[in-house]
Image: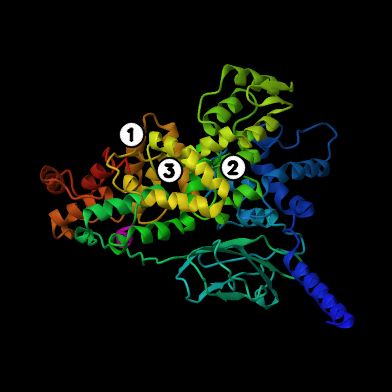
Amino acid sequence: MGRAALATLVALLAVSLHASAKETFLPDPPQADRDFYEKRVAPWIEANCAQCHRGGGGALRLCEEEPGLSERMRRHTDYARLLPFINRKAPWESRLLLKVLEPGEGGDPHVGGAFVAPDEPDYDALLDFVSGATLTNLPPEVFFEKNELRGKPGETIAVDGRGSYDRDRDDMDGLTYFWELYARPAESRVIIQDRRASRLEFKPDTGGSYVFRLRVSDGKVWSAPRAVTVEVFQHIKLEKTKPGGVTGLAKAEIRNLARLRRLYLDVLGRPPTPPEAIAEERKGIKFLVKNIMLRAEGGRAWVEEVAIRFGLFDDYRPVSDDARDLALKIPAEGTPPHVVEGVLARDPSFLRRHPPGRPLAKAIGELLLGRPPSDAEVLAAIELADGTPADIPGIGTVPDSRAWLVKVLDSRAFRRAAVLRRLGRFVDSGDARKRVERALGAINEGQQEWTAFLSDLLRSERYLNRKRLRPKGTVTFLRSLFVDLLERKPTDRELAALVRAVKTLPGKSAAFAAVVRVLIDSGETPLPLLVEIRDGPAWITDRFLRYLGRKPRTQEMKLYGQALLHPGGGPELVVHALLTSPEYMCR
């Protein structure tokens, strides 16, 4: 190639790279505007929030009243103190908004109660404020009909962003779109052909989870990104059973059904629906393990459970980009346990939830290292909380609590404890300890080796033929109830609210029974009337298979049949008895 041709090629590459950079690196979503706050939001804040939060009352501390302080200066101060409660990258999840929203509409618990509902003008004004509205421009908003789509490898899947809108105008032709393929399976080579399209199509080249994010611009500002997940695997159409009908589970082979339920509960944190069980119970174990492990649902369930175990929900939800996006970016089992837990423990909310001193010492010992903290660690934690550097056994001298936490997260002891916790999801503690060194070796070799290690574990005879029932964790139990009773998964808000309720009520079994009663009485559970059940024994058998993965014994059929026909019983009593049984509380 001649020098002139080479120079031309270099110039073309430079132009291409420059154009690509301009397209890829978009401005951040707009920050909340101070003038908009003063004119449109400040009067509402002062009327509803100032009484409790002016100078105190929770984490938000509005400006205190002082002689000679002008209204304008007070509002400037209030605006600055509200900024930490705004999430620019997901305004609709801002703590400022969720704290005043009705809990039934997705709001967070608030001592002062709820003030707004989504269909009220005050809610719109607050949403506009946290989204970066100005007095002359309202930012556009991304909208998807569904946040989760499904498809099969090789088929064309459309992701449509044309529902996005500009709140300043009815004509949507003025919007500019920008798509990002935020996450894809490790083996995939899928790319976005046209980032600026309003509707994109792609053909997944392998099974797994694909996450796309869309931002839109009205020519003045870019919106915050919204994500849509495309689950690609050999999925089953989920059809609800008519009240009083049976699902067809009676034709399933009990051994296969038990095996399938174990995989679903252990990997996805929920039981299979009847259509899933009917379609998959006769599949080979190699297919099942691969198909189930591919799903992003497993990664989300895992992150959700770790976050709740760390206490990172409600006011302590993770705030860092890494933590917030973790569930979107990890495949079900492609990320090592110490990485998943480490991202959440490094989030600023972890130290807010477990502040320096005894609480942090307890969290580091019990949550991260899997043991009670030593007396020396508690004393060191108290010194660090007072601002004094401390010597910690096995760690050395650290200047502050944050440095101590970081050193723990970088230690082999934490890595080993995190792997033991993950293995303990699938095997008993003794077996987990026998396998931990091999697991750590697989992790050191890379993602594929770790995934292969877990795949081999889930296909092993020891795992598949496990006889002993293991208690469901709180989150798995709650997810199971939603899938079995309401035929859907709980939302983040529902799950957090029920976890909080379970932790508040005394006695785990009693708390679980109370939740069962609440869901049955919710009006959303499709329970049949007695007259709708044409074959009582078949219906009872179907419920046993659905909830417990087995058929009723002769004596159980007799007792449950009596409960079904008793004047004070009926279908509701049968369902309640099964879902509060010790067997259902195990997996």
Q: Which residues are magenta?
A: 273-277
Kindly check if marks 2 and 3 are in contact, taking CB atoms under 8 A apart as contact: no
According to the picture, the residue beneath numbered tag 3 turns out to be 475
Measuring from the top left, give residue 381's x and y in whole percent: 65, 22
According to the picture, the residue beneath numbered tag 1 turns out to be 509
The quadrant holding residue 235 is bottom left
| Mark 3 vs mark 1: in front | 3
Q: Residue at x 20, y 61 (%)?
A: 251
Measuring from the top left, give residue 400's x and y in whole percent: 72, 28
Q: Residue at x 19, y 58 (%)?
A: 250
The verdict on residue 254 being magenta is no
Question: SS of the residue at dot 3?
Answer: helix
Of pointers 1 and 2, the one earlier in the residue sequence: 2
Q: Amino acid at mark 2?
A: Leu
CA gap between label 1 and label 2 equals 29 Å
Quadrant for the C terminus, please: top left
Of pointers 2 and 3, the one earlier in the residue sequence: 2
Q: Amino acid at mark 1?
A: Ser
Q: Amino acid at mark 3?
A: Val
According to the picture, the residue beneath numbered tag 2 turns out to be 344
Taking the image as shown, residue 105 lies to the left or right of residue 459, namely right
Q: Which residue is farthest right?
A: 4
Mark 3 crowd level (few <14, some 14–19, many ≥20, 10 Å Cα): many
Q: Residue at x 60, y 41 (%)?
A: 342
Question: SS of the residue at dot 2?
Answer: helix
Q: Is the stretch drawn in magenta largely helix, strand or loop?
A: helix
Q: Is residue 572 visible?
A: yes
CA gap between label 2 and label 3 equals 17 Å
